[in-house]
Amino acid sequence: MTNEKFSFRARVDSFGYAFKGIRNLLRYEHNAIIHLIATAVIIIAGLWLKIERWEWIVIVMAVGFVWVTEILNTCVERIMDFISTEQHPKIGVIKDLAAGAVLIAALTAVVAGAFIFIPKIIALL
């Protein structure tokens, strides 16, 4: 913790750094593009099927959960690559754990989406 005075400019700049990070994620991480496409499909489906407010809340939380874990997974991978570019079994385990977190988040989002979207799709048939 620093003793610097509050700076509105520094707070505004921090948003710029955050957006830069998201831009880098979308530019260099192929899985992020898959998440972006899935997010767009889910939003379009939600609008088309006119899901309720509480369902939007579930969808937003699930999608956010996936994005946060993907970003943190990318951070872990980059840190591990910074520590050592050589193959190391312990670093491999760390990267696999981070990837597993993304998988769990994605599966959780799929299940949440299934509970919301499947009954609405069946009702259309």
Image: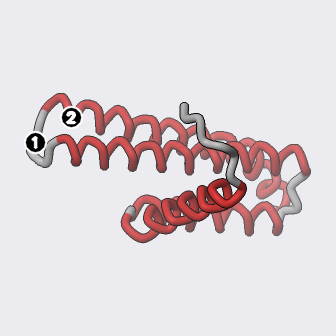
Looking at the image, which residue sits at the far left? 86
Residue 31: % across, % down: 42, 59
Residue 57 falls in image quadrant: top right
The label number, if any, that marks residue 91 in the structure image: 2
Could you tell me how far apart the alpha carbons at marks 2 and 1 are, in whole angstroms?
A: 8 Å
Q: Residue at x 29, y 38 (%)?
A: 95
The three-letter amino acid code for the residue at tag 1 is Gln
Residue 89 falls in image quadrant: top left
Q: Residue at x 38, y 37 (%)?
A: 98
Q: Nearer the viewer, residue 114 or 74?
A: 74
Instruction: Give the quadrant of the C terminus.
Output: bottom right
Badge 2 crowding class, 10 Å Cα cut-off, few under 14, some 14 to 19, many 20 or more, is some
Residue 73: % across, % down: 41, 44
Q: Residue at x 76, y 43 (%)?
A: 58
Whether residue 55 is situated above or below residue 90 in the rendered picture? below
The three-letter amino acid code for the residue at tag 2 is Ile
Instruction: Give the quadrant of the N terminus.
Output: top right
Residue 50: % across, % down: 88, 61
Q: Secondary structure at mark 2?
A: helix
Whether residue 108 is situated above or below residue 117 in the rendered picture? above
Q: Are marks 2 and 1 in contact (CB under 8 Å)?
A: yes
Q: Nearer the viewer, residue 45 or 76?
A: 76
Q: Secondary structure at mark 1?
A: loop
Q: Nearer the viewer, residue 112 or 27?
A: 27
The label number, if any, that marks residue 87 in the structure image: 1
